[in-house]
Amino acid sequence: MEAEVQVQAENPITGERTRTNNAYLVYVALDDNGKPVTVPSIIPETEDEKKKLEEARQRQALRLAAKK
């Protein structure tokens, strides 16, 4: 599973927030023996969700290709 993290800095006086960076974290589900297990797929419902899922798949493909 991939989770997007958005980091923001906040001015404590004005409360103005500025995005400083984004990151994508990859999580792997493990069984009781510490081995990776398959989890149910996410079913995107909106066009935005479909777009984000496709972008995640492309990032995963790039990560896997870079390992080879």
Image (spheres, helix red, strand yellow):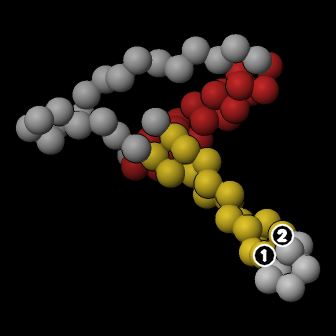
The picture places residue 7, in percent across and down from the top left corner, at 68, 65
Whether label 1 touches label 2, CB < 8 Å:
yes
Provide the residue designation for mark 1: 10
Relative horizontal placement of residue 40, taking residue 58 as reference (left or right): left
**Residue type (three-letter) at the residue carrying disc 2:** Arg
Q: Is residue 33 visible?
A: yes
Q: Closer to the camera, 5 or 64?
A: 5
Say above or below: 37 vs 5: above
Q: What element carries label 1?
A: strand
The 10 Å Cα crowd at callout 1, few under 14, some 14 to 19, many 20 or more, is few
Could you say which quadrant of the image residue 16 lies in?
Answer: bottom right
The picture places residue 68, in percent across and down from the top left corner, at 39, 46
Q: Residue at x 60, y 36 (%)?
A: 56
Say above or below: 46 vs 63: above
Provide the residue designation for mark 2: 17
Q: Residue at x 30, y 36 (%)?
A: 29
Residue 48's tag is: none
Relative horizontal placement of residue 54, taking residue 27 as reference (left or right): right
The 10 Å Cα crowd at callout 2, few under 14, some 14 to 19, many 20 or more, is few
